[in-house]
Amino acid sequence: MYCLGVVGRTFLQPGKALASHVCGLEPMCFIRSSRAYCMSSRAPGLVRWEIMITDGSASCMNRKIRRVAGIFLRFVMLLMLGIIAFGFAPVLLTLGSYCYFQLTDEMLPGIAVGGVSVGGFLPDEAARVLNKNWNEDLHLQAVDINTPSHSWEIAPSELGLSVAVDETIANAYGLGRSGNLLESVRTILGVLKYGAELDPVVELDLVLAKQGLERWAERVYIAPRDADLNLDEDRLVQIESLPGRTLDVAASLLMLAEEPESILLDHQLIPFVLLEVPAQRQDVSLQAETVQKLLGSSPILRAYDPVTDERFVWSPEPVLIASWINIESDGDRLSISLHDESLTRYVKEIEESLGDVRVLDIVVVEETLRSGLLGEESESLVIEYLPGTYVVEPDDNLVSISFKVGMPYWKLQEFNPELAVSGLVPGETLIVPPKDDMLTLPVIQKKRIVISLSEQRMWTYQEGELLQSYIVSTGIPNSPTLPGLFQVSTHNENAYASIWDLYMPHFLGIYEAVPGFMNGIHGLPMLSGGRRLWANVLGQPASFGCIILDLGAAQELYYWAEDGVVVEIGF
């Protein structure tokens, strides 16, 4: 082996000396920059010399020392960094909290406004909660400052008194977000540790306050009475005079405006300044005569049920009428009125006697009773119906349900809009339109048309008495006539059905089978070519849904049944 301090690869002729230091076959190493380069021959001729790098003994020892020292140094540095990080953890945590609340819209935990916790809320959420607690749900007591036992429940908003939600939330939101970094951090730490309670910002709208007090003045007002009248059951008696009271709007408004914050946040009592109104003596003989007339009246309340064709009559007894009479002072004379609550109670008792699904228009009934008490005659009222329910069965579809409940399928869709998305689900409860929902015109109470699908007959009634009986043909099975309660709604002397190219004489429209397509009662139809249909099949189903009469009967019915006559179709 020949050794030479050379870097790289070279090729030499074997046997030739490289330099005067090459001695035989003994290896010789030349040291250069602490590395030895050794070469050995591989074959005769041109020989490829390879370089092998090795560490000298001293260099190798130094490298091991440096490696151990480096590992120890890295360990020491990591240990020191851990100690520094642990020491700065509170600072990092505080700065992290600061950054979090600066980058998000959440209120600091622990914030409460007027006793309402809003910590962790977004401003919009906090505003809704605060508005609900202070402006929507809160009710205070309005107290007569002269007679504290007189009090009324009142919403502050009725008097223009409210919490300024936006401004209040802005104050709460600003905690930890205003001032310099040090002030913000100090605020955040304080709120997180001890919490923060803020007072809501209170605002008073003087215009609304005045309007509200004026409304309340009407409610708390008691008229003075002198030589007044009273009723003992159905007997009229005279009573002692009594002073009245009135709300001093200006004085009450002044007290409200002086300390709205204290009223809303601290006392939660609204001062009402009530003044005594002295009574005036007067002659009440004319008023007594009016009351006696009321007691002697016999009002009659009549009602008609267009679904069942029932008629009802109610007439209150004198003792009951006496309980409705209210005698009030009106300036220098007495005014006679009726107790709304008593009158309403009587009407509701009547309504309850009709059952769970029938109702009366309370306002109309009360007006009718008032007219009757004054001796006026009134027409019969019409009883109305409430919606019902139907539980879907496994084999149901909209058409089959419509036949069961006597209502067009599109009406069921109107009252159950979810059907357009989910369809029918067995076991589901549907809302069924009121039985009188198809009666859209004022009901003609003295006339009625009744049709039997099974008997293929029609009967007309007037004043409750049978007038005529007719043979009819109703719809065939694949285009049946819908049972239910309908109404004559249109008149057309010769209607045309383009879908079947039919002319229908003396057509009375009674219901829409589908929106925009009217089924009705008419005479024997005629094709546009002049051919008369179904003359020989009256008495059995033949039509596409309408009710067919012979020509004479259809003409007679056409001029007898005005719009509004009820048409009852049953099995």
Image (cartoon, rainbow, N blue to C red):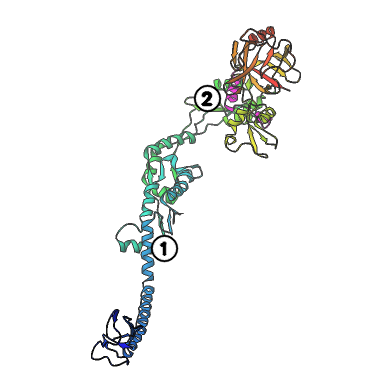
State the mark number for residue 50: none
Q: Secondary structure at mark 2?
A: strand
Dot 1 lies on which element?
helix
Residue 113 location, x and y as percent? 42, 53
Q: In the rendered image, which quarter is residue 506 located in?
A: top right
Depth check, front residue: 394 or 163: 394
Direction from residue 200 to residue 441 in the image, left or right: right
Residue mark closest to the camera, 1 vs 2: 1
Q: Quadrant of the N terminus?
A: bottom left
Outermost residue, right direction? 455
Prevailing secondary structure of the magenta residues: helix
156 drawn magenta: no
Where residue 354 appears, x then y in whole percent?
Answer: 68, 28
List the single residue furthest toward the left. Answer: 20
Snapshot quadrant of residue 404: top right
**Residue at x 39%, y 49% (from the top left corner):** 261
Amino acid type of the residue that numbered disc 1 sits on in the rendered structure? Leu
Relative to residue 446, is residue 144 depicted above or below?
below
* On screen, residue 325 above or below 539: below
**Magenta part of the chain:** 350-375
Circle 2 Cα neighbour tier, 10 Å, few/some/many (<14 / 14–19 / ≥20): some
Estimate how packed mark 1 is, as few (under 14), some (14 to 19) or many (20 or more) residues with alpha carbons within 10 Å. some
Q: Which residue is mark 2?
A: 335
Question: Height in image: 143 above or below 341?
Answer: below
Amino acid type of disc 2?
Ser
Q: Which residue is disc 1 drawn over? A: 192
Q: Is residue 358 visible?
A: yes
Q: Position of residue 238 (x, y in %)?
A: 58, 28
* Drawn side of residue 32 relative to residue 364, left or right: left
